[in-house]
Image (cartoon, helix red, strand yellow):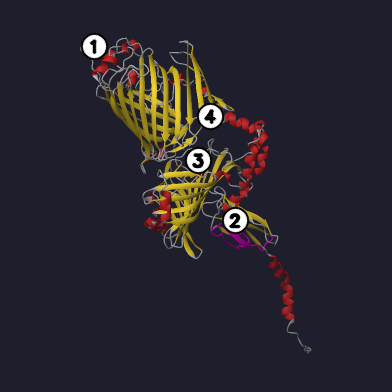
């Protein structure tokens, strides 16, 4: 058979193939892109270099250094997008393919506790080698090493309520606030949080290393609801930095060992992971985890420059068993930038803390503080000139127009745009303050915690002093009335009346405080008091007094209360300079009365025709507290001491015949106090003090130094807790109070204590004192059985103690031993009648809220 040959068109076959492939090509052209960002659920910071891929298609990539990604859509109609990163729970998000570009999406990774190890396969521990290289180059990479530097600092602080249960707002008490459910964050699906408060600050910051100086000028502040300038200063950057290059760093007053410490290999396991290129530069990925439980360490990771071993970015998360109270989670994210001169400097810091006072999985508070840095200058002579304006080592100034910047200014000057949630906060804050229920609840909580209730220009309280009891008055009523800032920002009037039912006497006090508005740091004070001394032992009005409703509940048994009646007029002028040097000239006239079991007043009179014990005193008090910061409130100021010593001195003289004064003498006293840390060994507090009274005549004990005693079971850090009040008196003395809080350094040696939150301390208090013969003859009645006032007779009184604190996060137990000087017992008298009614050992308790 023959087949007829025909001519074939050479384009037929390619044309047919094109027809067959056309639907596939069309589908390929329709495949769009998916893009977005991967963030950390807790810090809300981007997760760089996270692995992201399609589960079926197998294609994927990694996020960039800012956590952004862009991928082609899967060619499968339905696929799952998988995101993974070491230290986070793997995220799987199903997608239905639309073959079109998607809107930007946010993928949230849940951070997990890294535990004791990170699985990174390697034949040798390159992570340990990388850590050694970081330590070897710390000196040149530490941004703090420069002689001076300056930058523009932007701070943003946000407060959120976490684990918000929408059912709470169905209850009657919270129904007025139901509108805030519209502001609940929608990014997190499992644990929504409610943004409730935010502040911003923009400042110029200057720093020098030698001599150490820091200066911050806050030039803009968006602080809705925060009008107190001293509080505003804490929004700045001084004392708020975490320096990961130091061996030890502080968080909430607790010492943590840095993973970059020169002894870090004793506390951390290091694992080297992958390598990435950012801007053409090679970076190494290092993970670190704690070696043991119960130590204040971090887990996390960092990216290291492959050339100079500087830190590009580091993430720190406190270990699950770190000894810090109420903090469920704490993360620190720091980013550094490499300048054109190959110098590492600050770029961004973020601190996120989850405070859970009610326990895990309960309602908690999340604070987020973000700091960004611009216009960095290094070793500039102009910085030295600026720091020369400082009157102290650290100084924060708030410019006059800082609070007056409008939204246009902020939109232009803030370093990063506000998120949707952050913009909601400002709107919600304006609304919530107008709700009557919010005002009512705020006032009620303030009254319970602060003790005072405001009624416009006046206030009453504290409520815990309204009713009390003691052995002299039996039942005591007291009512206080004072003015508020609504009455005057500069003038405060305060007074109280008290009545004792047993002695049937009306008592009271009136005082005036005036801060001169145009003379910063100048305060005038005057007072008149006619009352019992109520346990005061020092020369100020800030001592905790016994006229409160709780004092009788914890008194030591078989100990008589001792009171002085005091009628006193006092005037003072206090001037404090910016360098925290203050001078306070004062005048006081005091008429004293004694009450049983103290010696009768007539036994203490030393002049013919004398009927009263009256002393008129002129003096001056000097105080120098470098680095101290002050929070000023209308009622009083709160002093936040630095780690530097505080020096105080008091010089006074009694002037005979001045306003019927009976005595002439000179008194000198001084003390040094300090609270500081010993790197690696906890915290120490000490007070070194001494004084002398110069006189040519015998003086009654109330004009001498009455060593402070304590007659209740609540531990007093400033007093001798096994010494009775008015037990020892001296006219010359020197002493020291010393306490060392070891925290968990020794307890961690016991494996079963590693997960405990308790902390250990030890302390010692000792004083040497003596009396002149004339003062001893007037005041000491050695043979009075029920009550004896004693002299130390040139000996030492010592109390040594130890104990545990942070029991159930709030309790402290002190075990105290007393070592008192031996007494001179006359021949033929049995020693038992001279024995003190105070025990040589005691157990005391106290309460302290601390992190």
User: Image height check: is 129 above or below 214?
Assistant: below
Mark 1 = which residue? 829
- For the residues bearing labels 2 and 3, Cβ distance under 8 angstroms: no
Q: CA distance from mark 4 to mark 3?
A: 22 Å
Q: CA distance from mark 4 to mark 1?
A: 54 Å
Front-lying residue, 256 or 158: 158
- For the residues bearing labels 4 and 3, Cβ distance under 8 angstroms: no
Q: Quadrant of residue 61?
A: bottom right
Q: Main secondary structure of the magenta part?
A: loop
Mark 2 = which residue? 37
Q: Position of residue 334 (x, y in %)?
A: 48, 52
Q: Position of residue 389 (x, y in %)?
A: 42, 47
Q: Secondary structure at mark 1?
A: loop
The reply to whether residue 234 is visible in this rendering is yes
- Within 10 angstroms of label 1, few (less than 14), some, or many (20 or more) residues? few
Mark 3 = which residue? 327
Q: CA distance from mark 2 to mark 3?
A: 28 Å
How many numbered tags mark residues here? 4
Front-lying residue, 761 or 531: 531
Mark 1 and mark 2 lie on one chain; the one further toward the N terminus is: 2
Mark 4 = which residue? 449
User: Image height check: is 783 above or below 234?
Assistant: above
Q: Position of residue 323 (x, y in %)?
A: 44, 40
Residues in magenta, as a range: 53-77
């Amino acid at each position: 058979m023959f087949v007829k040959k025909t001519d074939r068109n050479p384009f037929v076959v390619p044309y047919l193939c094109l027809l067959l492939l056309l639907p596939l090509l069309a589908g390929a052209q329709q495949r769009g892109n998916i893009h977005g960002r991967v963030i950390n659920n807790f810090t809300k910071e981007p997760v760089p270099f996270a692995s992201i891929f399609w589960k079926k298609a197998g294609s994927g990539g990694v996020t960039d250094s800012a956590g952004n990604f862009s991928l082609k859509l899967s060619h499968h109609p339905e696929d799952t997008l998988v995101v993974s990163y070491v230290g986070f729970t793997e995220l799987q998000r199903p997608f239905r393919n639309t073959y079109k570009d998607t809107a930007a999406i946010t993928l949230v990774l849940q951070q997990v506790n890294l535990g004791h190890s990170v699985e990174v396969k390697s034949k040798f521990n390159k992570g340990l080698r990388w850590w050694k290289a970081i330590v070897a180059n710390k000196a040149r990479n530490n941004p703090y090493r420069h002689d001076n530097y300056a930058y523009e600092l932007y701070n943003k602080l946000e407060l959120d309520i976490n684990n918000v249960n929408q059912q709470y707002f169905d209850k009657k008490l919270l129904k007025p606030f139901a509108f805030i459910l519209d502001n609940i964050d929608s990014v997190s699906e499992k644990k929504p949080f409610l943004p409730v408060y935010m502040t911003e600050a923009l400042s110029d910051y200057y720093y020098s290393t030698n001599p150490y100086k820091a200066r911050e000028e806050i030039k803009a502040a968006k602080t809705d609801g925060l009008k107190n300038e001293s509080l505003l200063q804490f929004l700045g950057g001084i004392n708020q930095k975490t320096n990961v290059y130091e061996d030890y760093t502080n968080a909430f007053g607790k010492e943590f060992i840095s993973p970059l410490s020169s002894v870090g290999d004793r506390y951390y396991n290091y694992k080297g992971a992958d390598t990435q290129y950012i801007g053409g530069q090679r970076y190494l990925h290092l993970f670190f985890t704690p070696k043991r439980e119960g130590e204040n360490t971090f887990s996390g990771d960092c990216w290291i420059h492959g050339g100079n071993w500087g830190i590009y970015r580091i993430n720190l998360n406190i270990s699950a068993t770190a000894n810090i109270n109420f903090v469920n989670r704490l993360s620190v994210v720091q980013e550094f930038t490499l300048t054109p001169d190959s110098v590492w400097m600050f770029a961004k810091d973020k601190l996120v803390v989850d405070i859970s006072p009610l326990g895990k999985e309960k309602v908690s508070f999340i604070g987020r503080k973000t700091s960004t840095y611009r216009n960095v200058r290094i070793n500039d002579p102009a910085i030295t000139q600026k720091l020369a304006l400082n009157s102290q080592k650290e100084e924060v100034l708030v410019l006059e127009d800082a609070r007056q910047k409008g939204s246009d200014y902020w939109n232009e000057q803030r370093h990063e745009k506000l998120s949707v949630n952050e913009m909601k906060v400002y709107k919600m804050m304006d609304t919530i303050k107008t709700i009557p229920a919010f005002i009512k609840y705020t006032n009620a909580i303030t009254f319970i915690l602060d003790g005072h209730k405001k009624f416009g220009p006046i206030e009453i309280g504290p409520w815990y002093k309204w009713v009390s009891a003691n052995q002299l008055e039996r039942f005591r009523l007291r009512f206080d009335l004072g003015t508020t800032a609504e009455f005057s920002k500069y003038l405060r009037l305060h007074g109280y009346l008290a009545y004792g039912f047993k002695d049937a006497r009306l008592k009271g006090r009136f005082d005036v405080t005036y801060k001169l508005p145009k003379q910063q740091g100048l305060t005038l004070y005057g007072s008149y008091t006619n009352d019992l001394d109520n346990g005061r032992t020092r020369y100020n009005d800030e001592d905790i007094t016994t006229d409160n409703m709780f004092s009788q509940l914890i008194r030591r048994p078989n100990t008589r209360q001792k009171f002085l009646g005091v009628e006193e007029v006092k005037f003072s002028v206090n001037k404090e300079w910016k360098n925290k040097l203050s001078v306070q000239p004062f005048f006081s006239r005091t008429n004293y009365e004694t009450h049983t079991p103290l010696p009768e007043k007539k036994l203490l009179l030393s002049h013919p025709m004398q009927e009263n014990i009256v002393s008129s005193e002129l003096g001056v008090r000097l105080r120098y507290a470098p680095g101290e910061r002050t929070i000023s409130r209308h009622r009083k100021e709160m002093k936040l001491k630095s780690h530097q010593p505080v020096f105080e001195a008091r010089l006074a003289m009694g002037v005979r015949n001045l306003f019927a004064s009976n005595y002439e003498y000179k008194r000198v006293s001084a003390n040094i106090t300090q609270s500081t840390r010993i790197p690696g060994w906890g915290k120490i507090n000490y007070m070194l003090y001494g004084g002398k009274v110069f006189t040519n005549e015998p003086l009654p004990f109330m004009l001498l130094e009455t060593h402070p005693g304590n007659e209740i079971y609540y531990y007093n850090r400033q007093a001798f807790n096994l010494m009775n009040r008015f037990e020892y008196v001296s006219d010359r003395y020197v002493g020291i109070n010393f306490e060392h809080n070891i925290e968990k350094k020794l307890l961690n040696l016991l494996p079963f204590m590693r997960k405990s939150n308790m902390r250990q301390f030890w302390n010692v208090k000792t004083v040497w004192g003596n009396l002149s013969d004339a003062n001893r003859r007037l005041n000491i009645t050695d043979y009075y059985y029920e009550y004896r006032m004693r002299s130390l007779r040139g000996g030492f009184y010592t109390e040594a103690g130890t104990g545990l604190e942070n029991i159930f996060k709030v309790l402290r137990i002190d075990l105290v031993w007393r070592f008192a000087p031996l007494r001179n017992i006359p021949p033929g008298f049995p020693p038992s009648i001279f024995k003190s009614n105070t025990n040589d050992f005691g157990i005391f308790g106290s309460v302290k809220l601390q992190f």
